[in-house]
Image (cartoon, rainbow, N blue to C red):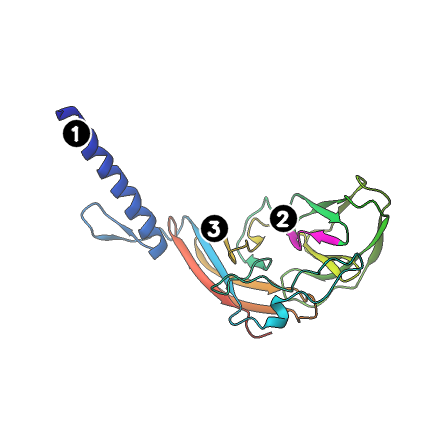
Amino acid sequence: MELMRFALVALVACSGGKARTAEDARAGAKHSPDGGEVKIDPTGKGDVQIRVEWKNVPVAARASPGATSCGSPRPPAVAPTTTWGIPDVFVELDAPGSGGGGVQRIALAGCTLAPRAIVASKVTIASTSEQPSQLRLQQVGKLPLGSALAPAANRDVYLPIAGHEVETAFDVGTIHVLQLGDEQVTIVSSESPFVAVTEPNGQVTFHAVPAGTHAVTAWLPARSGQPARISRGKVIVGGGALAEITLDITTP
């Protein structure tokens, strides 16, 4: 009985310690065992959680803009959460680092392309359609997000049958659009681990960000008749802590 009581007390103590650690990280602070605050390491690395919002998204942006050439409904410009978090938004954190990009896959099913936004240095474009398809790949910009457009460079991508795949590489720092009719995928090529796309909840989290003050940019490309939107801010990162920032793209 005494052994069981000791194990239960130890389990409660460990669980309480973990819960407080997570809560303190969200608050951007650490505490010593006696409850006093400990200064955050200004030379280490921390995490950054970025949320992108578009408040009161108009119905036109949330509704299907019509049908594809196959007769299926086109996806809306955005699919906000109930709290106006926006997925498929590119986010760039201006911090040093390498190891981003890589190979991503784009799927053509009928007349629909997915995903709509990716960060990749190389893509594999694959078709599941029984009909031949010709897509247009165009360079439309460059990093950092929101900078002036780069000279356009176009090429056609031909997918003759289901199962056919085409692999394409991109110059680092460029932005391309792969288009089929009114459907499009925006591709950002970057080697930074701090360029990403917001998840369905409208958030993205970067890990092991060097301590310091960093600029943050959120960019939603023009889509389905809606203009591009951009928002900028700054975040202070402390070693061993979680910093949080919300960027509002309500105004184009």
Label 1 neighbour load within 10 Å: few <14, some 14-19, many 20+:
few
Front-most of residues 96 and 34: 34
* Mark-to-mark CA distance, 3 and 2: 15 Å
Tell me which amino acid carries mark 1.
Answer: Phe
Q: How many marks do you count on the picture?
A: 3
Tell me which amino acid carries mark 2.
Answer: Glu
Tell me: 137 left or right of 223.
right
Residue 49 point in image, percent of width and height? 46, 55
- Tell me the element at label 3: strand
Residue 8 point in image, percent of width and height? 20, 32
Q: Name the mark nearer the viewer: 1 or 3.
A: 1
Where is mark 1, residue-wise? 6
Residue 1 in view: yes
Name the N-terminal-most of marks 1 and 3.
Answer: 1
Where is mark 3, residue-wise? 209
Label 2 neighbour load within 10 Å: few <14, some 14-19, many 20+:
some
- Tell me the element at label 1: helix
* Mark-to-mark CA distance, 2 and 1: 51 Å
Where is mark 2, residue-wise? 191
* Mark-to-mark CA distance, 1 and 3: 40 Å
